[in-house]
């Protein structure tokens, strides 16, 4: 489960994870708000019925974010998710300086859009 990994990595990096880290939408308050996603940011998505999903930003095309996540079709994968489903973009609160490679990544659209990441 990617949220358990987020919590573990966050703790090992010296940061406090969110309360109840297994709830995807709770990650919408972690770190720093970012207006535009960049490599490595946590994206929080809405799901039908009020649930949520999150993963790491690896790139985007005109209509979708390309998201590295767990439990996407029962596997760890990179999935295209519509930008309109994104609720929050959260960035690590860097203790030193943000690395230069933390930037938006433009990719070609390819593959189906995910409608349910379960």
Image: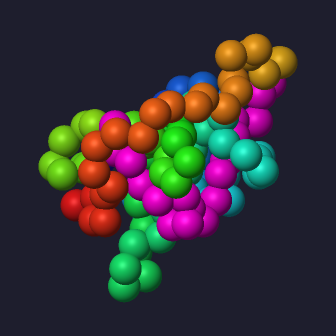
Q: How many marks?
A: 0
Residue 99 picture location, percent across and down: 74, 16
Question: In the image, what residue occupies the spot 58% across and 31% down?
Answer: 106
Residue 12 picture location, percent across and down: 54, 27
User: What segment carries the magenta color?
Assistant: 78-95
**Which of the pair 78/63 is nearer the observer?**
63
**Can I make out residue 111 in this image?**
yes
Question: In the image, what residue occupies the spot 50% across and 31% down?
Answer: 107
Q: Main secondary structure of the magenta part?
A: strand
**Which of the pair 21/54 is nearer the observer?**
54
- When the figure is inspected, residue 99 is found, relative to residue 51, above or below; the finding is above
- When the figure is inspected, residue 17 is found, relative to residue 101, above or below; the finding is below
Q: Quadrant of residue 29?
A: bottom right
Q: Quadrant of residue 41?
A: top right
Specify whether 9 is left or right of 118.
right
- When the figure is inspected, residue 18 is found, relative to residue 60, above or below; the finding is below
Residue 7 picture location, percent across and down: 48, 43
Question: In the image, what residue occupies the spot 64% across and 59% down?
Answer: 88
Would you say residue 111 sits in the magenta stretch?
Answer: no
Would you say residue 85 sits in the magenta stretch?
Answer: yes
**Can I make out residue 25 in this image?**
no
Color encoding of the figure = rainbow
- When the figure is inspected, residue 18 is found, relative to residue 102, above or below; the finding is below
Question: In the image, what residue occupies the spot 47% across and 59% down?
Answer: 82
């Amino acid at each position: 489960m990617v949220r358990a990994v987020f919590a573990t990595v966050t703790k090992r990096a010296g940061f406090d994870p969110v309360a109840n880290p297994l709830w995807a939408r709770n990650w919408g308050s972690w770190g720093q708000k970012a207006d535009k996603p960049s490599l490595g940011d946590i994206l929080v998505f809405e799901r039908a019925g009020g649930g949520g999903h999150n993963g790491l930003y690896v790139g985007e095309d005109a209509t979708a974010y390309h998201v590295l996540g767990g439990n996407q079709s029962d596997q760890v994968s990179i999935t295209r998710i519509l930008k309109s489903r994104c609720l929050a973009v959260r960035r690590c609160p860097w203790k030193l300086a943000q690395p230069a490679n933390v930037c938006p990544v433009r990719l070609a659209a390819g593959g189906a859009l995910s409608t349910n990441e379960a």
